[in-house]
Image (spheres, helix red, strand yellow):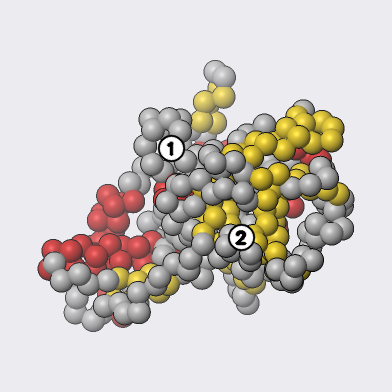
């Protein structure tokens, strides 16, 4: 239980941002999918301002626990020059209100809303972006999809271009975003030997990512199904398709099928691919590359028995 929320606001250069307005709200109904600060409960009368270290401290009106659906809003301001193009913390990307509100002097202000905080005792690190990230206008190669095949193709091309030394670029097109563990820190704080993590890289470079949904409680179950393309076309990971003779669970995210393949890599029966053009076009067949794939991915055998106390379960029991 807590009645204080603390945090910092930094820019993408890790410099503190001063005089940013931060406010805490309680979502009134968990079924309200469109979080609106005008409808939700403000937990303190006025927004808190960040100090010269980017620090803010919000004292709530009473003690709360995570299941009280507390979230933060920060406000950019036209007259102060604090106009943001993107906002996120170590948990989520903030959503920008469609319609700004106008103060008595005619200046526009806009709220950015975060997701419900998982742990109110954690220090919140908010990163704001003041400028639009520059995207190169030209690439030498474009790879569509970032799954197993796309990743290997992109790495092969990147190594070749690097060896040639001509500053050539590879672009990977992916319909989904990055996904990382919520246990991975968004900032180097010594928890992983002080080394930078992929999450910190994404955080600092304002690249969209989400943390894995964990369906281990009712909130996690809603989060899991809420991240399917059936419900959410933008922020999603699971793409379930029903075809005539097969059900397909695919992924939408950086990593493609590697996000949902459950760490199982099977060697296909030859009858499944022996009539493919790759087997009859005069080049090496697929079986030539299986060992390369095993080494690249790091495939290990599945044990055929499992120890449960002093008993052993045979493979046929496990399959059933």
**Foreground residue, 19 or 186?**
19
Residue denoted by label 1: 188
Asked whether the viewer can see residue 199, the reply is: no
Dividing the image into 4 quarters, which one contains the C terminus?
top right
Q: Are marks 1 and 2 in contact (CB under 8 Å)?
A: no
As displayed, is residue 317 above or below residue 251? above
| Label located before the other in sequence (1 or 2) | 2
Dividing the image into 4 quarters, which one contains the N terminus?
top right
Q: Position of residue 33 (x, y in %)?
A: 79, 60
Residue denoted by label 2: 80
Left or right: 280 as drawn, with respect to 88: left
Asked whether the viewer can see residue 88, the reply is: yes
Which residue is pictured at 33% across the width and 51% down the height?
297
| Mark 1: secondary structure | loop
Which residue is pictured at 18% across the width and 64% down the height?
162
Q: Quadrant of residue 217?
A: top right
| Foreground tag (1 vs 2) | 2
Residue occupying the far top of the picture: 310
| Mark 2: secondary structure | loop
Measure the C-alpha gap from mark 1 to mark 2: 30 Å
Q: Position of residue 59 (x, y in %)?
A: 76, 34
**Foreground residue, 229 or 262?**
229
Left or right: 182 as drawn, with respect to 217: left
Which residue is pictured at 41% across the width and 43% down the height?
197
Please count the marks in the image.
Answer: 2
**Foreground residue, 47 or 141?**
47
Which residue is pictured at 30% across the width and 66% down the height?
154
């Amino acid at each position: 239980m807590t009645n204080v929320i603390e945090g910092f606001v930094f820019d993408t250069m890790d410099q503190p941002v001063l005089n940013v307005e931060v406010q805490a709200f309680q979502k009134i109904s968990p079924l309200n999918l469109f979080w609106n600060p005008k409808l939700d409960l403000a937990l303190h009368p006025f927004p808190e301002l960040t100090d010269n270290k980017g620090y803010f401290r919000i004292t709530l009106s009473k003690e709360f626990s995570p299941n009280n659906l507390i979230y933060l809003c920060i406000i950019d301001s036209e007259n102060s020059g604090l106009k943001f193009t993107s906002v996120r913390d170590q948990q989520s990307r903030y959503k920008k209100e469609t319609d700004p509100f106008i103060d008595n002097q005619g200046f526009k202000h806009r709220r950015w809303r975060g997701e419900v905080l998982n742990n109110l005792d954690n220090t919140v690190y908010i990163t704001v972006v003041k400028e639009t990230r520059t995207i190169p206008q030209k690439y030498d190669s474009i790879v569509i999809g970032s799954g197993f095949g796309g990743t290997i193709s992109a790495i092969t091309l990147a190594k070749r271009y690097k060896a040639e030394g001509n500053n050539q670029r590879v672009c990977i097109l992916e319909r989904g975003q990055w996904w990382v563990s919520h246990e991975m820190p968004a900032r180097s704080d010594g928890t992983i030997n002080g080394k930078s993590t992929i999450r910190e890289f994404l955080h600092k470079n304002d690249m969209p990512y989400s943390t894995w949904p964990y369906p281990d409680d009712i909130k996690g179950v809603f989060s899991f199904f809420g991240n399917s393309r059936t419900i959410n076309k933008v922020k999603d990971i699971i793409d379930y398709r029903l075809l005539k003779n097969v059900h397909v669970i695919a992924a939408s995210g950086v990593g493609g099928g590697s996000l949902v393949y459950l760490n199982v890599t099977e060697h296909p029966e030859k009858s499944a691919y022996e009539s493919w053009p790759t087997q009859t076009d005069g080049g090496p067949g697929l079986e030539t590359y299986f060992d390369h794939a095993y080494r690249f991915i790091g495939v290990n055998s599945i044990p055929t028995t499992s120890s449960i106390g002093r008993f052993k379960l045979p493979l046929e029991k496990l399959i059933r």
